C-alpha cells in the first residue's frame, strides 16, 4: 500500500494490483470481493479467479438485463450501441473477448459494474482526468489507471482500516467529482 500525498483529500492510498492483462478486473475485484482478498498474494490463484470471472461475464452478456427484462446485457451495454458496432462486436466475438486473457476493452467496464452492482471512478494518472461509469447511485470503487495498468485507491481511516467501497455521498467521492487529478500524479511518484 502506498500513500498518495498529492490528492487534496487526505489519506488516499494505492493498493497495487498484480501485473496482468486483466489488471482492471484485479483492481476492481480487490475493491469489494472477500473471495478475491482471501487469496491475496497467490498470483496464480488470483489469475485463475479472474479467468473464472471472465468466463462468467462471457455467459452473463447474453442473459436478460436486470434493468429491462426484454433486453439482453449485450443489447443494453454501451447504451445499446454494441450490436451496431459491426462484426468485431458481434455477440460471439464479444463473448470471446470477455472470456480471453487480453486486456478488457474499456467498452465493457460499465457492463462489469452493472453485473457486480458498483459505480466506477477511474483516475487516469497520465491524462489527469476522472472517468465515471454511468452512475446508478450505487456504492463506488475508485481505480487509478496508468497506461494499461490499474490499481485500487482507498482511504486509510483513523482506525487504520482502509475503505475501498464508497457511498455516493462519501467525501472522497465528492472530492473526485469536484477537483481535477493532481498534476504531479504519476507512477514514479507512487513507487515505494
Image: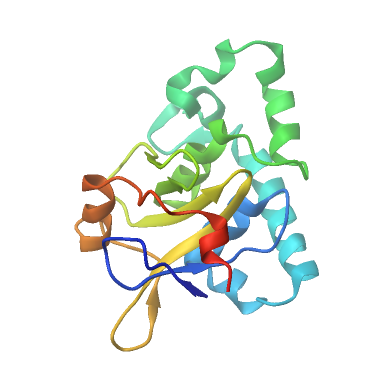
> Is 82 situated left or right of 45 in this image?
left
Q: Which residue corresponds to the image point at 20% horizontal and 62% vertical from the top-left?
A: 171
Q: Is residue 122 above or below residue 192?
A: above
Quarter of the image containing the C terminus?
bottom right
Asked if 46 appears above or below 103 in the picture, the reply is below
Q: Quadrant of residue 130?
A: top left
Residue at x 36%, y 36% (from the top left corner): 134
Q: Position of residue 18 (x, y in %)?
A: 68, 63
| Residue at screen point 50% across, 43% down | 126
Farthest residue in the bottom direction?
159
In front of the other: 5 or 101: 5
Left or right of residue 175, residue 118 in this image: right
How are the colours assigned in the image?
rainbow
> What is the tally of numbered marks visible in this picture?
0
Q: At which x and y percent is residue 174?
A: 21, 53
Looking at the image, residue 73 lies above or below residue 102: above
Residue at the location (48% across, 67% down)? 14
Amino acid at each position: 500500500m502506498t500513500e498518495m500525498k498529492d490528492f487534496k483529500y487526505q489519506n488516499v492510498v494505492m493498493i497495487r494490483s498484480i501485473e496482468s492483462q486483466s489488471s482492471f478486473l484485479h483492481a476492481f475485484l480487490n475493491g469489494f470481493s472477500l473471495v478475491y482478498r482471501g487469496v491475496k498474494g497467490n498470483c496464480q490463484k488470483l489469475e485463475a479467479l479472474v479467468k473464472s470471472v471472465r468466463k462468467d461475464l462471457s455467459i452473463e452478456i447474453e442473459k436478460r438485463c436486470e434493468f429491462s427484462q426484454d433486453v439482453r446485457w449485450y443489447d443494453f451495454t454501451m447504451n445499446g450501441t454494441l450490436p451496431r458496432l459491426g462484426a468485431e462486436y458481434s455477440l460471439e466475438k464479444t463473448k470471446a473477448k470477455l472470456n480471453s486473457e487480453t486486456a478488457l476493452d474499456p467498452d465493457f467496464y460499465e457492463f462489469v459494474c452493472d453485473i457486480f452492482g458498483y459505480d466506477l471512478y477511474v483516475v487516469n494518472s497520465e491524462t489527469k482526468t476522472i472517468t465515471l461509469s454511468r452512475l446508478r447511485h450505487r456504492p463506488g470503487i475508485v481505480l487509478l489507471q496508468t497506461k494499461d495498468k490499474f490499481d485500487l485507491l482507498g482511504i486509510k481511516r483513523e482506525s487504520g482500516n482502509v475503505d475501498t467501497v464508497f457511498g455516493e455521498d462519501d467525501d472522497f467521492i465528492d472530492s473526485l467529482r469536484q477537483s481535477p487529478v493532481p498534476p504531479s500524479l504519476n507512477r514514479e511518484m507512487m513507487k515505494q
